[in-house]
Image (tube, rainbow, N blue to C red):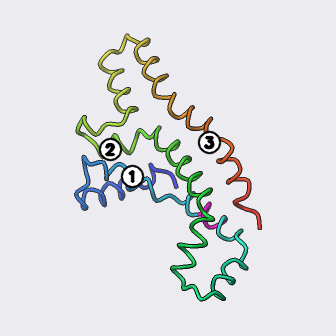
Amino acid sequence: MSLPVVIVPLFIIVRAMGMLNTYGGIIIPSIFNAFGIFLLRQYYLSLPREIEEAAVMDGAGYWRIYWSVILPLSKPILSALAILFFLANWNAFLWPLTVASDQKFWVVQVGIANFKSEYSAAWNYMLAASTIVAIPTLVLFLVFQRQIMDSIKTSGLK
């Protein structure tokens, strides 16, 4: 799903909910993503059915199975999904620009774009700001690279 396809209906929904110029208006729509749903589905299909059946034999209900068995097994994929969503949404430009007109809700990419229009000839400042903005994503990826790759490698296997 591409954002330009759904930006107008999504904007109407966010406006109707009163979330313009709020952090919720920027964050909540980006949480729900088809990629995340597919990745979680594939991971849950790869979990052995015997684990769930053993919990049923022990007398656990549906919610107990989820909280005590499935959720602890899902920590690697959920953390990898959180990291991937952070990396994808850190560079978001169009949606935060659309939803937040107040400067205090601007993300760094919108700030750099406005920095450019304010200091159009100062490319050295723009490149310095872009480098500083890229550092957190680079560090996050380097720290969690193995976990991201391991969870993606096993997400489609049975």
Q: Earlier in the sequence, mark 2 or mark 1?
A: 1
At label 3, the amino acid type is Phe
Q: Which part of the image, by quadrant, shows the C terminus?
A: bottom right
Residue found farthest to the right: 158
Horizontal and vertical percent position of residue 55: 64, 82
Horizontal and vertical percent position of residue 12: 29, 58
Q: Nearer the viewer, mark 2 or mark 3?
A: 3
Q: Is residue 40 magenta?
A: yes
At label 2, the amino acid type is Thr
* Residue indicated by mark 3: 144
At label 1, the amino acid type is Ile
Q: Nearer the viewer, residue 119 or 85?
A: 85
Residue at the image point whose x is 62% and y is 42% from the top: 144
Are the residues flagged by discs 2 and 3 in contact, CB closer than 8 Å? no
Q: Nearer the viewer, mark 1 or mark 3?
A: 3
Residue at the image point whose x is 53% and y is 35% from the top: 137
Residue 45's place in the image compared with 127, above or below, is: below
- Residue 17 lies in quadrant: bottom left
Residue at the image point whose x is 55% and y is 75% from the top: 66
Mark 1 closeness class: few <14, some 14–19, many ≥20 residues within 10 Å: some
Q: Look at the numbered disc 1 and give the secondary structure of its residue.
A: helix
Q: Nearer the viewer, residue 68 or 78?
A: 68
* Residue indicated by mark 1: 7
Q: Earlier in the sequence, mark 2 or mark 3?
A: 2
* Residue indicated by mark 2: 98
Residue found farthest to the front: 58
Give the prevailing secondary structure in the magenta stretch: helix
